[in-house]
Image (tube, grey):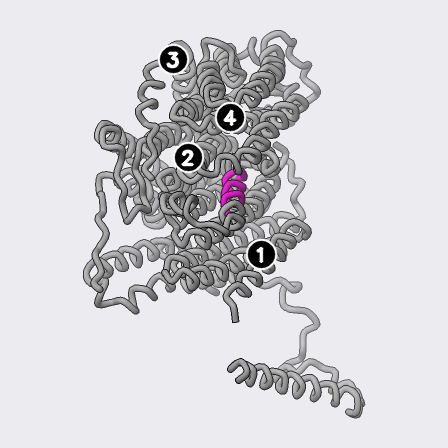
Amino acid sequence: MSLTNYLVLSTLLFTIGTMAVLLRRNGIIVFMGVELMLNATNLALVTFSRMHGNLDGQVFAFFVMVVAAAEVVIGLAIIVAIFRTRRSASVDDVNLLRN
Amino acid sequence: MSYAAPHIGWLQIAPLAIVLGTGLVGVLVEAFVPRRARRTTQLVLVFAALVAALLLIVAQWRDTMASGGVSLFGGSYLLDGPALAIQGTLVVLSILAVAVFADRTSVGQDAFAPAAAAVPGSDYEELARRKGLEQTEVYPLAMFGLGGMLLIVAAGDLLTLFVALEALSMPLYVLTGLARRRRLLSQEASLKYLLLGSFASALLLFGAALLYGFSGSLHLGEIAAATGTIAGLEGLLLGGMTLLLIGLFFKVGAVPFHAWTPDVYVGAPTPVTGFMAATTKIAAFGAMVRVVYVVGPSLQWDLEPMLWTVAILTMVVGTVVALVQTDVKRMLAYSSIAHAGFVLVGVLAFSTEGIASVLFYLVVYGLATIGAFAVVTLVRQTRTGAEGTVILGEATHLAQWAGLGRRSPWLAGALSLFLLSFAGIPLTAGFAGKFTVFTAAADGGAVPLVVVGVIASAAAVFFYVRLIVLMYFTPEREEEGEEGVTVVTSSGFTTVVIAVAAIGTVLLGVLPGPLLELLGQAVKFLP
Amino acid sequence: MTNPYVPILILGGVALVLALGGLGASAIIGPKRYNRAKLDAYECGIEPTPHAVGGGRFPIKYYLVAMTFIVFDIEVVFLYQWAVNFSELALFGFVATMLFLVVITVPYLYEWRRGGFEWA
């Protein structure tokens, strides 16, 4: 099986992720789209690494995984904070929110 | 095969190590130092570290310029002239920006939420406010962000570039959501920044993967070397470069990738807006200039159409949309977009003069930006109720700024100076910056771009001057019932920052020569 | 000779048919007699509560644990290279990895001091 197929798959996944980011309105789904893009890129990196016969791409993929995890954590923290703010009954509290 | 440990240039990485190390120590301070002493400890740490980093950068200047720079960690960290110059700029501007963070003003509160994790309006937050708690985590976060910026301008390979980009972005996502007032707006800005920012990083990453696929190497120099030798894979090369540049365009806020800029600049606490408007843009431009000048030359004909389109769109859209803004922060946000366009004109000169002009323009822009946002932090709304007059958040609507020149002539004067510098009026630094950028671009053959740039700057004068006219020649608005506007006194930090920025702006406007000459030495990229 | 992965594909197909077939067959031919006891949620003899405690909310600690875990879990990939090349990387690798471990411990110290690990 040709290695090119992996690249095609990677591009497809990347495109799906991009579409999810551009078309969906739910913050969490958008975020999943971004993660899909990152992981699609990982596939491309590992494939290229195999094609070129050096390890740079695989090392890059490790770093991408770590960055993706950090992004998820920060993203979730912000989303949770917003969720709590939004649902709180006292959002219109004059003292804090009015300028 | 035995493994040889890489040579570590301790002196060369010292500024970066100090900044990141301070961030780390800052986290420990948050964990172990008693609450009362935290703010003082953080401030002492941060300023000591920034000054030390600056001194180390200055100490390396002569050697680096003479030798052309050093390549460390197998070419991952390239400390050459442009990298060192931008690192110096970043550290100086960070000192100013962090000083604005620290200002509590006469109200006795800084710009950050006392307990950012608390639900706005909850009892817990009210308690935190009454006890005078502060979110001193902002200082380590700023240090981590600055560390990423110092790294990205020296990134010699795509892996370092990507990691540095994330390292500079993530602390900013969090900082954006920490505003004391208008919490929901701030948190939404934070989410928006995070989603669009990580989307941009993902695009950049895929571009990096394609470039790796093209050349089999992550090093910019080797990718550049491969451009002439590998035939039949131009699709990978061009696609990769395009995606890589799009990622960086996002970070500098170039049109059509600017959608996040106004919302994030408005939602973020104003000191953070000043910090990120100045430093992120500079760092991302540092990375962009390196990519374009190291890998780009052999692709100049292929990349130019895209870069030209983006530059023209950025200048035009930034200026035109800024004309119709009624909010000071939003207006400054669009003006910063327009400025990204002007810097791009300098990048497109494709010459050493172009690099020098970009470096100079970034210094000028950074000074005026931090100064202008520092002024915005001091103009506040008030509300007179049963319990007397309460000072609220910033008065950002343009109408609220009417007559400011009469009440606080110094503050309005400083802001006017920054606005004139943005507009590029002679005898301010902005003029010198625009002049050098446009001259370099015209010499480099980008005359149509220069024409658009000059027209855009002329149009931009209108909205900058409109605010000045509003401050000086429009009578103060009648107090409408209980609403009012006041100027709070700085607790010292912001005053110093505004003064330094103003003096710098005038000095660089009257005497741009020395700095231009200095930056003229720093134009050689290591491959 | 066909592709060596074909048997795996066949196995996957068989598994799919079995799983879907079992579900489908019981749905079609199985008897359906519902009574109250059968429709009740099975909760080890405890009277089932109509909603989760606290109106369907679960504590914010859940996210804290999840986030702490994700970061800690993923950081381990950097130890992997060190582990497979332990002897070759020698002292440099050891010092670098220890430095890395110290650095990633700092956030946990922060979280601990700020009460992030206090369940209850």
Task: Label 3, secondary structure: give it.
Answer: helix
Secondary element at tag 1: helix
Gap between marks 1 and 3 measured at Cα: 50 Å
Labels 2, 4: one chain: yes
Circle nearer the viewer, 2 or 4: 2
Q: Tell which subunit mark 2 falls on.
A: B
Task: Say which chain tag 1 marks.
Answer: A
* Residue B151 numbered mark, or none: none
Between marks 2 and 3, how big is the CA–CA gap?
30 Å
Q: Which residue is mark 4?
A: B345
Q: Amino acid at mark 1?
A: Phe
Are labels 2 and 3 assigned to the same chain? yes
Segment tinted magenta in the rendering: B240-250
Gap between marks 4 and 3 measured at Cα: 24 Å
Secondary structure category for the residue under label 2: helix
Question: Can you identify the residue that label 1 sits on?
Answer: A14
Q: Examine the residues drawn in magenta and state their main secondary structure.
A: helix
Distance between the Cα atoms at labels 1 and 2? 28 Å
Amino acid type for the residue under numbered disc 2: Tyr
Categorize mark 4 by other alpha carbons within 10 Å: few (<14), some (14-19), many (20+): many
Residue B383: quadrant of the picture = top right
Q: CA distance from mark 4 to mark 1?
A: 32 Å
Does residue B510 lie above or below B115 as drawn? above
